[in-house]
Image (spheres, rainbow, N blue to C red):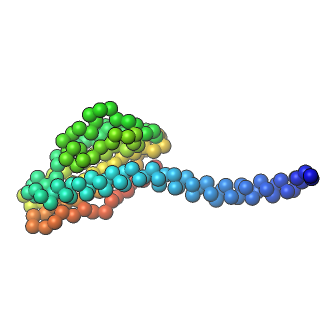
Amino acid sequence: MRSVTPLEAAVAVAVAGAVLATALPAFVRNLHASKLVEPIDGLGRIATRATALAAGRPVESAYPESVPLTPAQVPAGVRVTDPPGTWEHPTWRALEFGFTVPHSFSFAFESGGSPEQAAFRARAHGDLDGDGSLSELSISGQSRAGSEPTVSPMELYREVE
């Protein structure tokens, strides 16, 4: 059995470095993207349920009342398990939304209305790397007298902070 020459070792290290340099950024991007499943799925569930509720109500009360960021403190770079009662607000119950498993984002629901039009906006805030800089994703919808409720596309602000 022969030993590896310094030239062969240098070539092997260079090839390994090149592979790592191209694969690592893609891996990190995919890791961050997988962490966005929680807020995207959560906001989608909220919008679907809010729209279903609005379809059977008078326009001025189409959506449940506003509820502040829940949990109030955005998890900082960790997944948290909420204490019992965190998601018991009547709005979260009406929207059938909450977490019983560890999660990384806080959610809020804002609504308002008049006899002609009602609107909602659901937001998700997260601090995936714990640096104090927040990601925000939101979705909104509206209900107008005489028409079906609608939902706007999701908006992302600093989705990977």
Q: Relative to 50, does residue 88 appear above or below in the rendering?
A: above
In this figure, what is the number of numbered marks? 0
The picture places residue 77, in percent across and down from the top left corner, at: 46, 40
Q: Residue at x 9, y 61 (%)?
A: 116
Asked whether residue 114 is in view, the answer is no
The picture places residue 21, in percent across and down from the top left corner, at: 66, 56
Q: Residue at x 67, y 55 (%)?
A: 20
Q: Relative to 97, does residue 146 appear above or below in the rendering?
A: below
Residue extending farthest bottom: 147
Asked whether residue 124 is in view, the answer is yes
Q: Is residue 97 left or right of residue 25?
A: left
Q: Residue at x 34, y 48 (%)?
A: 124
Q: Is residue 58 left or right of residue 96?
A: left
Residue extending farthest right: 2
Residue extending farthest front: 1
**Viewer-closest of 53 and 5:** 53
Q: Is residue 49 left or right of residue 10?
A: left
Q: Residue at x 16, y 66 (%)?
A: 148
Q: Is residue 3 left or right of residue 37?
A: right
The picture places residue 33, in percent across and down from the top left corner, at: 47, 55
The picture places residue 69, in percent across and down from the top left corner, at: 29, 42
**Viewer-closest of 62 and 74:** 62
